[in-house]
Amino acid sequence: MTNAMYTLPKAELHLHIEGTLEPEMVFALAERNGMELPFASVDDIRSRLDFTSLQPFLDLYFECGAVLRTQQDFHDLAAAYLTRAHEQGLRHVEMFFDPQGHTARGVPVDAVIDGLLSALAEAHEEWGITGGLIMCFLRDLPVESAFALLDSVAHRVDDLIGVGLDSTEVGYPPELFEQVYAHARGLGLHAVAHAGEEGGPEYVSGSLDLLKVERVDHGIRSLEDPELVERLRAAQVPMTVCPLSTVRLAGVPTMADHPLPRMIEAGLLVTINSDDPSYFGGYVGDNYLAIQQTFGYDNLAMAGFALNSVTASFASDARKDELREEIAAWGKKHG
Ligand SMILES: Nc1ncnc2[nH]cnc12
Ligand SMILES: [Zn+2]
C-alpha cells in the first residue's frame, strides 16, 4: 500500500529543476545532443553523491546540467519531475531554474522558459497541478550578469512568479543583489533567496532587510541568532527547509541532528521540500517520510507541514482554499 506521506496533498516551494536530472537522463540527453560526458556510467555519477559541503555538489550539478541544450530537453526534464512528484502527492510547485547556467553555454533563455512552461501546462491539464517558475540568480556571478538576465526576460515577466538567489553562498552576501532585487520587485515579481544554508544568520537578516524576501530558502542557521528567530517567528516568514539536502550536504551528521524540530519549537513557519532530489536521495514525499520516520510526528502533524506549504505559496487565495480542503479531507482519512 502507498505510504500516506505520498498521498498527502502538498506544495513544493524549494525545488531546483536542474536538480531533478537523474543520471539516466544525463546519459540519454548527452546521446541525443551528441555530447561526450566526463562520466564512465550512471553508477559513476551515483558514486559521486557523497558530498562534504555545498560546493562539490554544485560542481557536479553544473557539470551534469551541461547536457540540457534544447527547449525539448527542458520540457522532458520538468515532465519527468512532475510525474515523480505527482506520484508523491504534489499539487502545486514553485520551480527554481538557473538560466545563467544555460545561457553561458549558448542556450536561449526563452528555450529554457518555454520548455519548462510547456511541461507545467501539461501537468495542469493532466493532474490539476498548479504553480510556475522562480528564476534564480547565481550569486557567485557578477551582479551585472543578473541584471542582464532580468533585462532579457522583462518582456515576459508574466511567465514568472518571482526571483530567487542560489549557488555558492558564503562570500556572496545578499547586499550584492540589493538593486537587482529592487528592480525585480518593481516588475511585480515575488522575491525569495537562499540564506542561512551554509552562511550565517546575517545572510538571513540581510535577505530580509535588503532583498525584502517573502520567504527564506533553507534558513537553518537562523537558529544561531535568537533575535532573528524572534523576528522570523513574529512575522511568520516561511522557511523552505530541505531535510535530505541538509544531511547530504553535511550540514548535519544525520537526520536525527536536523534542526527542524527546534525550528518548530521556536514557532517558525516551516515547509518541507526536496531541493535537488536526484542528488540528495529523495523527492518531496520522501522528505516528508524521512522526517516522520526520524522524529515520529503523527499524520496530523505532517498535514500541518503540508498546510504550511500552501500558506507559504504564492498561489491565489482560491487555490489555497482548495488545497486546504484537500489536506483536511486527507487528515480525516489518515488522522
Ligand atoms: N541547495 C542549494 N544551495 C544553493 N544553490 C543551489 N543550487 C541548487 N541547489 C542549491
Ligand atoms: Zn536550493
Image (spheres, rainbow, N blue to C red):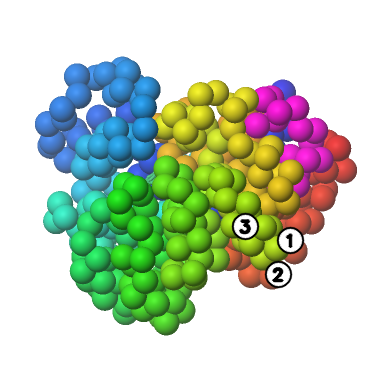
Q: Of the residues shown, which amino acid type is indicated by label 1?
A: Glu
Residue at left offset 31%, top offset 22%:
48
Q: Earlier in the sequence, mark 1 or mark 3?
A: 3
Residue at left offset 68%, top offset 52%:
268
Whether tag 1 and tag 2 are in contact, CB under 8 A, the answer is yes
Tell me where residue 223 appears, x and y as whole percent.
Answer: 59, 46
Q: Which region of the structure is painted magenta? A: 291-305
Q: Which mark is residue 322?
A: 1
Ligand 2 near label 2 (Cβ, under 8 Å)? no
- Residue 215 part of the magenta segment: no
Tell me where residue 54 appears, x and y as whole percent.
Answer: 36, 37
The crowd level at tag 3 (other Cα within 10 Å; few <14, some 14-19, many 20+) is few
Residue at left offset 35%, top offset 49%:
169
Secondary structure state at the residue bearing disc 1 = helix
Residue at left offset 74%, top offset 40%:
302
Report the number of numbered marks. Answer: 3
Foreground residue among 185 and 104: 185
Foreground residue among 19 and 170: 170
The crowd level at tag 1 (other Cα within 10 Å; few <14, some 14-19, many 20+) is few
Relative placement, left or right, of 216 versus 49 is: right
